[in-house]
């Protein structure tokens, strides 16, 4: 069991609380086909993984909200351009990209079946809940559309913080914003470096959510298969 001192629980966002309902490849392909593209979903998924891994962090400090929104969209345009340079560009790329960017504002996403119930239960037990995510400002629209925004007290996203996980600064910002001591916090996410090791480096307890059973080498005391299993790690659940 986890310490009864836990007062604050931070969550990653995408692939922890919600996911791309039809998969990234299928979602990209369905929009591209409307504008003259004909990519294969598997090729898109592989090209995206390559483009995303080679991109700089999604983090813009010291800019206005309006400037940030421009930077966010340009960031994703560069990634999507690199994807289609890999799988084949088409004439109506810009119109396609504008729609794709909006699709990922809300329509592309779905919550995991247990998400809302777990969040409600934790709020009912008076835990402070926060988001620490390498996401852009669309996360607020996504979470409003999925009806889970209201469960969170504070949001720290990389595009606003100016730092992306696993950089310790984004965790420091979240701790300060929440007014929390690391020893009283738990962080939950699906990325072993960004979420698990990133949080633990600051003395924050972490649970790795391992829905596909990829991380057998992580002890069962440090991972969960779904959000419902959070409760077994909390003494007063």
Image (spheres, grey):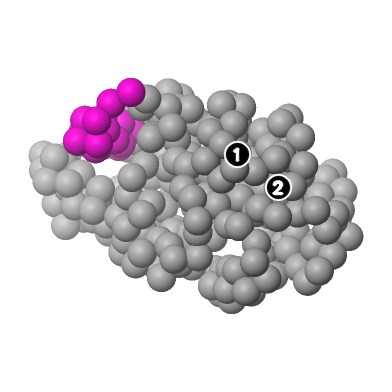
In the figure, residue 77 lies in which quadrant? top left
Q: Which of the pair 39/1 is nearer the observer? A: 1
Which x, y percent locates residue 21? 43, 65
Left or right side of 102 for 61 = right
State the predominant SS element of the stretch in magenta: helix
Residue of label 1: 175
**Residue 23 place in picture, x, y as percent:** 44, 58
Which of the 4 image quadrants contains residue 7? bottom right
**In the image, residue 73 lies in the stretch drawn in magenta:** yes
Along the viewing direction, whichever of 152 and 69 lies nearer the viewer: 152
Q: Which residues are magenta?
A: 62-80
**Crowd class of label 2 (few under 14; some 14 to 19; many from 20; radius 10 Å):** many
- Front position in the image: 174 or 23: 174
For the residues labelled 2 and 1, say whether their Cβ atoms are less than 8 Å apart.
yes
**Which of 221/66 is in front?**
66
Q: Residues within 10 Å of mark 1 (few under 14, many from 20)?
A: many
Q: Is residue 188 left or right of residue 96?
A: right
Q: Position of residue 11 (x, y in %)?
A: 59, 52
- Please indicate, yes or no, whether residue 53 appears anywhere in the rendered image: no
Q: Residue at x 32, y 58 (%)?
A: 141
Looking at marks 2 and 1 on the same chain, the residue that comes earlier in the sequence is marked by 1
Q: Which mark is residue 185?
A: 2
Q: Give the residue displayed 41% in from the left and 70% down from the top.
A: 147
220 inside magenta stretch: no
The answer to whether residue 162 is seen in the rendering is yes
The residue at the point 36 percent across, 64 percent down is 144
Measure how far apart labels 2 and 1 are at the Cα level: 9 Å
Relative to 149, residue 8 above or below: above
């Amino acid at each position: 069991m986890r310490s009864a001192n836990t007062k604050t629980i931070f969550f990653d966002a995408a692939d922890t609380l919600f996911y791309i309902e039809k998969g990234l490849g299928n979602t990209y392909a369905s929009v591209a086909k409307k504008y003259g593209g004909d990519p294969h979903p598997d090729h898109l998924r592989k090209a995206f993984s390559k483009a995303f891994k080679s991109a700089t962090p999604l983090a813009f400090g010291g800019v206005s909200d309006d400037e940030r929104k421009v930077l966010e969209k340009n960031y994703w345009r560069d990634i999507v351009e690199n994807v289609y340079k890999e799988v084949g560009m088409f004439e109506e790329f810009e119109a396609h990209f504008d729609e794709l960017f909006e699709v990922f504002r809300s329509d592309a996403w779905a919550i995991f079946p247990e998400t809302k119930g777990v969040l409600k239960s934790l709020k009912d037990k008076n835990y402070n809940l926060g988001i620490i995510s390498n996401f852009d400002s669309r996360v607020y629209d996504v979470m409003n559309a999925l009806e889970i925004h209201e469960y969170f007290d504070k949001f720290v996203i990389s595009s606003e913080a100016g730092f992306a996980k696993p950089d310790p600064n984004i965790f420091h910002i979240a701790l300060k914003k929440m007014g929390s001591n690391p020893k009283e916090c738990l962080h939950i996410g699906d990325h072993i470096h960004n979420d698990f090791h990133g949080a633990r480096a600051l003395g924050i307890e972490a649970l790795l959510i391992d829905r596909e059973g990829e991380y057998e080498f992580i002890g069962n005391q440090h991972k969960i298969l779904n959000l419902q299993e959070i409760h077994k790690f909390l003494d007063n659940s």
